[in-house]
Each structure stands twice: as C-alpha cells, then as structure tokens.
Amino acid sequence: MQKINKNYVILLIIIFFGLFYRFYQSNFDDYWFDEYFGFWVSDSRLDFLETFERSFGPGKGQNLFFDFVLKYIYLLFGYYPENGRYFTVFLSSLAIPLLTYLSYQIDKTKSYLLTAFLTSHCWYLISYSQEVRCYSLNFLLAILSFIIFLTFIKSKNQNFKKYIHICFFYILVNLIGLINHVFFGLIIMSHFFFSFNFIDEKEKFKILIINFVLIGTIYLFLMFPFLIKNLNTSDFWITQVDFEFFFSYFFPRFFGSKIMGYIYLISLIYLIIKSKNLIFQKKSIYQLLFIVLISSYFFPLIYSLFKIPILIDRYIIFVLIPIILLISILTFKQSRKVRNYLVILIVITTFSNNYLEIFKRVNTKPEFNKSFSFILSNEPGDIKILAKNEKNHLWLLNYLNKISYSKYQNLNFLNYNDFGKNDRLWILCHLPSNGFKCNSDKINNDYIITLDKSFSLIKVFLFEKK
C-alpha cells in the first residue's frame, strides 16, 4: 500500500510539472501568421455557414474540425487571442494523464512514471501547447485512438453490444482526427496493418475491417472535395528534407536541441535493437508502436518523392506517442543497471534542457504587444499596418483589434488603402508578411521618418509631416 501511495505522489508531482510548463508563459509569444489567420477563420461572431466558408475557402479545409471547436470556445469564453492559447494548453495538459494511462494499459510496471515524465517535459509538446493550431488536438485524438483500439483488440468474448460501443467511439475519434488533419490517416493505416495479426480471430478481424471501411467511406463522403483539391496541388510551401534529416528524424526539434535529440534517438535505437524479440512478436503492442513509428516517416517520404514534399515535424506530432512509449516501457525491460543509467541520463538532461528553454526563453514570434507599448509611450497617432495584400491586412487587423484588448482598445488602425490625415503616422511592418522588407515607398511623400524601432519580426516607424 505504501509503495502505491509513493508512486501516486510521484505521478502527481510529474503531472504538476507538466501543467506548470504549459500554463507558464502560455501567452509569452504573440500570434504569428497561421495563428492570426486561424483566429480570423474561427471568429465567434460569424454564423455556421460563414465559418465553414472561411475554413473551406481560404483555409482549404485543412483544420476544419479545430476551426469549429475554437469558434465555440471563443463564443463561450470571449473572442480574444489569449483564450485560444488557454484552450490548446488545456488540450496538451489533458494528453499527459491519457498517455500515462495508455502506457499502463500496455505495461503494468512503473514505466508509466517515465512515460508521464517524458510527456510532461517534452519541449515540443510544451511549445505546441502554446500555439493556437490543431496539433495539440491531433496528438490528443491520436492517444484516444490508441486507447480505444487497444481496448478492442484486448477484449475477449465480448457480446455484440460491447463491441458496438467500442467500435462507435473508435470510428468517431478517428473520423474527427482525419477531419482535423489528413495526416491522422497514418495512425489509422498503422492500425489497419497491425490488424492482420488477428486474421485467425475471424470475428474480431471482420469487425476491425468494417471499422476501417466505415471510417474511409464517411470521410470521403464528407471531405472528398477537400481531398481532391489537396491531391491536385502541385505547389506547396514545404521543402524537401535534406540529407541531415536521415540522421536526426526531427528528434532535435522534438526534444529541444541537437544534443537532446541525439540522446533520445540513440536511446530509442538501442532499446529497439535490444528488444527486437518483443517488438516483432505476433500481436505484440510494441509491434503496433513500431509500425506507427515507421509509417509516420515512410509514407510522407514516398509521397514527397513522387509528388511534392509534405513531410514536416508538426504534421506527424503523433509520432511522439510510439517514441515516448517505446523509450519508457522498453527501458524497464532492461537490466537494472541499464535501466537506471538510461533513466538518470534522460531525466537530468531533460530537466537541464527545459530550464534553458523555459526560464531563458527568448521571443521567436512577432512582438506586437511590445510594439504597441512602445507606440503608447511615444504619443500614439494613427497606425498603418504594412501588408503585402488586402487579405493579409484583413487577417492581421482582425487579430490586432483584439490583442490585449483592455490595454490597446483605443489605438486607431487605418484601413488598407488609407494613410490618414493627422500629422503623425505610425507604420507597423510585420516582416514575414512583407517578405522581410519594409517598403517605405508605400508611404505618402509628405511624411518623413523621425523614429524607428525593431522588435522580433516587427519594425515600427514614426512618420511625421514635413
């Protein structure tokens, strides 16, 4: 009893750290392009059809489910950027106990404590919990998909009603995951491949195949136009992976630095080699995790080779599930000496890295708040936003009108083609939206620059009439 209480306390402490990392400085960075565009798409003041048109039009339907969930979060709690961040932090926080439960579902040793630690302290999961995009939801849905799938394949002699309940939730979660992001199909595909382990259990295998057919059929019925539009795309912003990728597989991005990335990658490779008999055993859950790990990289790479590059780390955020589970569970399958060495190495280096990433953090996104504070401290006037086109101006202005609303609600932003009539004119140049060039030729010749200031990805100029 004392042992159980001790482990329970350790687990609570680990989860507390995970929650702290995510909530601490959750609004440290302001929004960047994808976030303020998504903020415009999910405007709670719109009706259902208007939101659908924005998501399926300019948004290309890529985050359709997340757009609507976010819309109703804003409707409940207020249409302010800060509330979007609290929502994704909540989703990421919920993933910690769920992935810990999944670990315990697979292996009943104390490895679930290491799973909780890795999930709580994974810098990639922390950083994406503080971005208002669909990836934290994608990660959470992938965990739920695994939990339900494992519940089904482990079930024995269940009655038909029990199977129906499990299958309903499995279809629902995976369908939402696919609509949320098409790369979720890699999870479903991996489950499909693993299902052939159960071909000798005819009833179970038949139900699994029916599930996959239903998921695919319903998805095509709902999202066929979106799928065709994206499959016909011949130009995409993602670049082809370079040679270095085949030595790192995004691990430095996942775990905060090159050193941390290689510590985790080498540990994973070592554990897979040492535990190959466990992994390749028929119906082994470790085999399922290995299939997801390989599929997450292999199929996007193949598509990139024959069509266009599509492989980028955040699209396969769910690959962290097999990475974390294989490292934590297989570590506890090793000798006591090896296990202790790996645990100490991972825990100490991860703590050190998180200290640098969190408490020595620097801004990596546009510093709109600091720009506005600077303007307010120097006699505010009209503010003109430089944007490469009217649409980008609209999306950014919608966000800026809501950012830290109580502090900056009296700032006067000009329309896209308006230069105002006052003697003082502030120009705010969002560098990424302007090709990292602030073209002063767009400003009326009656003005001259009297003050300028640079912030992260932002330049601010004060123009005064001659």
Image (tube, rainbow, N blue to C red):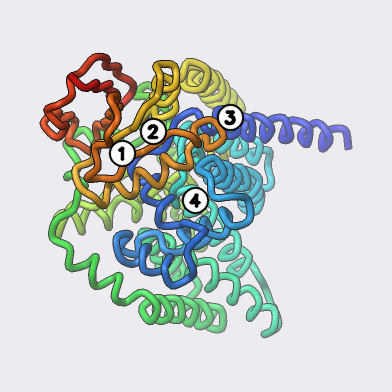
Give amino acid for label 3.
Tyr
Residue 265 bears which disc, if any?
2
Of residue 91 and residue 146, the one placed in the foreground of this image is 91
Quadrant the C terminus occupies: top left
Q: Provide the residue designation for mark 4.
A: 139
Sequence-first tag of 1 and 2 = 1
- For the residue carrying disc 1, how many other residues have a C-alpha within 10 Å: few (<14), some (14-19), or many (20+)? some
Left or right: residue 168 compared with residue 398: right
Tag 3 and tag 4, C-beta contact below 8 Å: no
Which quadrant of the figure has residue 383?
top left
Quadrant the N terminus occupies: top right
Q: Which residue is located at x 20 percent, y 59 percent?
A: 303
Q: Which residue is located at x 68 percent, y 38 percent?
A: 110
Q: Which residue is located at x 55 percent, y 28 percent?
A: 25
Q: Secondary structure at mark 3?
A: helix
Which quadrant of the figure has residue 260?
top left
Left or right: residue 77 compared with residue 305: right
Left or right: residue 218 compared with residue 298: right
Give x and y (percent) for residue 424: 29, 24
Tag 3 and tag 1, C-beta contact below 8 Å: no
The residue mark sitting in front, 1 or 4, is 4
Q: Secondary structure at mark 2?
A: helix
Report the Cα–Cα distance between label 1 and label 4. 18 Å
Tag 2 and tag 4, C-beta contact below 8 Å: no
Q: Provide the residue designation for mark 1.
A: 249
